[in-house]
């Protein structure tokens, strides 16, 4: 996500932004339930999980399966309160549904006798949940005691070894050390000071990634159009201002956004060139349309047509 936005993710960014029909992400807009289910069906179909089976995956499957996994089977199990929050169950909702999802599954495991005739069944499994088998998993308390015992032994070994080594080093040093007057320290010559040339630094560093045209966010007002044209909108994924697109990108690179780009350019030219960048003049020319993008677009197109700046399409021959 950060590589697409080309900035750190902020608190107002959506983790699951909406996806346009062109396949580009709609930064600043959250995905809908129907869009997520459509994407889920596509993933399931390509994975062949349901091959030869009837039915389909829904978000409810993940709600129930995720609750069971986090409450019963995960290495770091969640509390019932955390499972309720993530599952979307309100605090004042009846917990009957949640109990069927979680505890009934556990009860079915404990009260099942389908393996009672099997030779390798767990001994005393139905007396305690994990049974009395020696292969049962260790508890946290067991691991903590084991860890403390290991650390105590290691510290004892380190203390004994350190005292023995320090004593032998002192004895050896006093017997073999030469007089201070005979000691000489040969220092290696300093390395030559070779400053890296700008050319070598530039050649070694990889070139920055080239920006790509993104999807133009939804434009609702004149202010939106002016902002996108002059400054862009990094919060919504528009990192490059629209006024720079024609000089930085090829037309084919933003073909899917060409109509939006052209409409916003016409608005900005009308505001800056015809109205001198003055909001009062623009309001006098297009009264009440500053916040009505669709109607403003039609009014600007009509003005351009009166000035002969638009070309009418030739009708096809019948």
Image: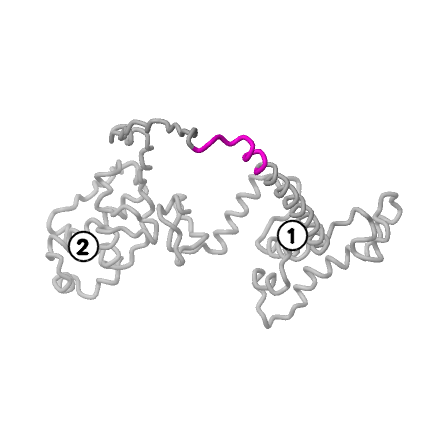
At mark 1, the secondary structure is loop
Left or right: 160 in relation to 133 = left
State the residue in front, 1 or 164: 164
Residue 313: x and y, percent? 21, 42
- Residue at x 31% of width, y 37% of height: 210
- Provide the major secondary structure of the magenta segment: helix
User: Which quadrant, please, contains the C terminus?
Assistant: top left
Residue 153: x and y, percent? 69, 47
The quadrant where residue 222 appears: bottom left
Residue 211 shown in magenta = no
User: In the image, is residue 84 above or below residue 268?
Assistant: below
State the residue in front, 30 or 174: 174
Q: How many marks?
A: 2
Label 1 or label 2, whichever lies nearer to me, is 1
- Which label number is shown at residue 300? 2
Q: Separation of disc 1 and disc 2 at Cα?
A: 60 Å
Give the residue at mark 1.
74
Residue range highlighted in magenta? 170-180
Q: How are the colours assigned in the image? A: one colour
Give the mark, 1 or 2, whose residue is nearer the N terminus.
Answer: 1
Residue 107: x and y, percent? 77, 59
């Amino acid at each position: 996500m950060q590589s697409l936005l080309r900035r750190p993710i902020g608190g107002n960014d959506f983790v699951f932004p909406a996806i346009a029909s062109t396949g580009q992400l709609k930064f600043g807009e959250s995905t809908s339930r129907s869009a997520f289910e459509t994407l889920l069906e596509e993933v399931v179909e390509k994975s062949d999980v349901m091959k030869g089976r009837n039915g389909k995956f829904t978000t409810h499957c993940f709600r129930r399966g995720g609750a069971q996994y986090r409450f019963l089977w995960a290495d770091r199990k969640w509390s019932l309160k955390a499972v309720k929050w993530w599952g979307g169950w309100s605090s004042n909702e009846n917990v009957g549904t949640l109990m069927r999802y979680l505890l009934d599954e556990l009860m079915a495991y404990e009260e099942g006798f389908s393996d009672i005739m099997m030779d390798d069944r767990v001994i005393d499994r139905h007396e305690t949940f994990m049974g009395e088998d020696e292969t049962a998993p260790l508890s946290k308390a067991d691991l903590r005691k084991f860890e403390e015992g290991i650390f105590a032994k290691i510290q004892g070994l380190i203390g004994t070894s350190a005292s023995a080594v320090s004593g032998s080093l002192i004895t050896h040093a006093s017997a073999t050390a030469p007089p201070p007057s005979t000691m000489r320290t040969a220092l290696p010559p300093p390395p030559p000071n070779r400053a890296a040339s700008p050319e070598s630094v530039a050649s070694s560093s990889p070139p920055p990634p080239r920006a790509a045209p993104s999807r133009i966010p939804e434009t609702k007002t004149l202010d939106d159009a002016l902002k996108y044209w002059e400054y862009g909108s990094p919060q919504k994924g528009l990192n490059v201002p629209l006024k720079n697109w024609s000089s930085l990108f090829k037309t084919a690179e933003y073909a899917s956004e060409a109509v939006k780009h052209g409409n916003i350019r016409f608005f900005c030219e009308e505001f800056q060139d015809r109205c001198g960048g003055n909001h009062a003049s623009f309001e006098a020319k297009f009264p009440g349309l500053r916040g009505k993008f669709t109607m403003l677009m039609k009014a600007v197109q009509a003005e351009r047509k009166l000035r002969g700046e638009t070309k009418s399409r030739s009708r096809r021959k019948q």
